[in-house]
Amino acid sequence: MRYNRYAMPVHPKVLEKDFENTVDINTIPEIYNILKGKSLSDLDDDTLKSMTKYLEKAWNSINYKKGVNLRDREKLAPVFQELNRILFGRKKVSKAYRGVRLSNFDPNALSRTFPNSINDPEVLEHLEGLAYGLRSWILEKEGAEHWANSPYIHTEKDMVILEIKNPVVVLDSEVVIDLTSKFDHFIVDTDEVVLNIKNPKILKISPNKDIDRLYHVVIRDMG
């Protein structure tokens, strides 16, 4: 069967356009060692302020081609997991969504192949790459639709809303924002969760009835 293997982490054509890190990634294991096994009371404000400042630059700037690039992004997962543990963040949510556009190497893969997209290995690999790894997801479908179909960005690319049920949460915005806002540092947005999808399987692809070139894609992590 096709899914008796791990999904390609990130499509090589996407990695060709990957940006260079704008933060020192050697800081990541240093932060992890500070957090490992600690409780919030063990961490003073200076430590928390410095740490959240770094994580803001490393993660919150990714949409602007800054921070930690795709090749190194999963190195942040242990840090986020420890931070979520310390802050008693949610371990799971019932559903999460991610609004994206298809990658430049095949920007209309879905509109070109639908309704046969679910049987096309290249299209599935493309979608897997958009779901795979350490990524920001959102809890409201409407928010994901806004990211995919932003009125401020004109594009002819196909748009996708990824959906996953009962995912394991790596970092929960609900608890992180309470901590970081007092330092004026923002790692994640409201209603956001960071997930680390290890082996996405595409279960269903369906077109949006009202918006042309917008597709709803349901996934499961086979990780």
Image (cartoon, helix red, strand yellow):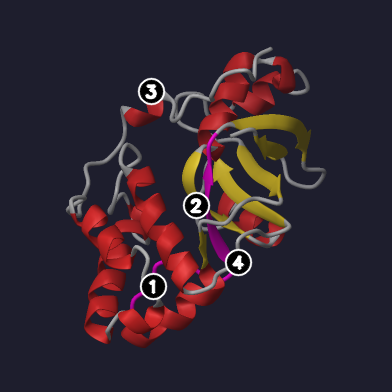
Looking at marks 4 and 1 on the same chain, the residue that comes earlier in the sequence is marked by 4
Residue at horizontal 72 percent and vertical 40 percent from the top: 212
Can you tell which of label 4 and label 1 is closer to the viewer?
4
Q: Secondary structure at mark 1?
A: loop
Residue at horizontal 48 percent and vertical 49 percent from the top: 135
Looking at marks 3 and 2 on the same chain, the residue that comes earlier in the sequence is marked by 3
Disc 4 crowd, CA 10 A, few/some/many (<14, 14-19, 20+): some
Looking at marks 3 and 1 on the same chain, the residue that comes earlier in the sequence is marked by 3
Can you tell which of label 3 and label 4 is closer to the viewer?
4
Residue range (magenta): 184-198
**Residue picked out by circle 4:** 90
Q: Which quarter shows the C terminus?
A: top right
Measured Cα–Cα span from mark 3 to mark 2 = 25 Å
**What's the amino acid at mark 1?**
Phe
The spot of residue 31 in percent (x, y) is 26, 62
Q: Residue 34 sits in which quadrant?
A: bottom left
**Residue picked out by circle 2:** 153
Tell me, yes or no, whether the two marked residues, 3 and 1, touch with CB atoms within 8 Å: no
The spot of residue 15 in percent (x, y) is 34, 30
**What's the amino acid at mark 2?**
Ile
**Residue picked out by circle 3:** 12
Measured Cα–Cα span from mark 4 to mark 1 = 18 Å
**Residue 99 seen in render:** yes
Q: Nearer the viewer, residue 185 or 63?
A: 185
Location of residue 62 with respect to 222 vertically, above or below: below
Q: Nearer the viewer, residue 196 or 128?
A: 196
The spot of residue 217 in percent (x, y) is 70, 38
Disc 1 crowd, CA 10 A, few/some/many (<14, 14-19, 20+): many
Measured Cα–Cα span from mark 3 to mark 4 = 33 Å
**Residue picked out by circle 1:** 186
